[in-house]
Image (spheres, rainbow, N blue to C red):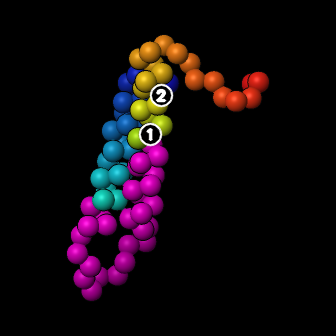
Amino acid sequence: MTMSWTIGWLIVSTLLAGLGAWQDRRPVGLAPPPLVPALFWLALGTIGIVLCLAHLISLLTGVELHGRGNF
């Protein structure tokens, strides 16, 4: 992935985490609960942020991240 794609996914992940935080903090009324829980969006956004930041660091430093296997 290029730098622009990584930054784009970082923005999307930040928006997902923000959506989850907003849904978690809004007052509970008599409306039915959302179909997708706020914790799911918050977790998905946080995982995306961590992965994008790791990839961004590897792009900026030029060091490739290798797995544990011999692949």
Q: Is residue 2 visible?
A: no
Could you tell me the amino acid type at mark 2?
A: His
Image position, residue 10 (x, y; %): 37, 37
The image quadrant where one finds the C terminus is top right
Task: Give the secondary structure at mark 1.
Answer: helix
Q: Residue at x 48, y 13 (%)?
A: 62
- Badges 1 and 2: C-beta atoms under 8 Å apart? no
User: Which residue is situated farthest in the top direction here?
Assistant: 62
Taking the spot 41% from the left edge, 17% from the top edge, the residue there is 60
Q: Dot 1, crowdedness within 10 Å: few (<14), some or many (≥20)?
A: few
Q: Residue at x 48, y 21 (%)?
A: 58
Query: Does the magenta portion include 55?
Result: no
**Closest to the observer, 9 or 59:** 59
| Residue annotated with mark 2 | 55
Answer above or below: position of 48 versus 71.
below
First in sequence, mark 1 or 2: give its number: 1
In x, y percent, where is residue 27?
23, 75
Bounds of the magenta span?
A: 22-48
Distance Cα–Cα, label 1 vs label 2: 9 Å
Q: Is residue 20 left or right of residue 61?
A: left
Q: Which dot marks residue 50? A: 1
Question: Tag 2, which secondary structure?
Answer: helix
Direction from residue 11 to residue 64 in the image, left or right: right
Q: Check residue 46 for magenta coloring.
A: yes
Q: Is residue 42 visible?
A: yes
Tell me where residue 31 appears, x and y as whole percent. Answer: 29, 82
Residue at 34% x, 81% y is 32
Q: Amino acid at mark 1?
A: Val
> In this picture, is 71 found above or below 47?
above
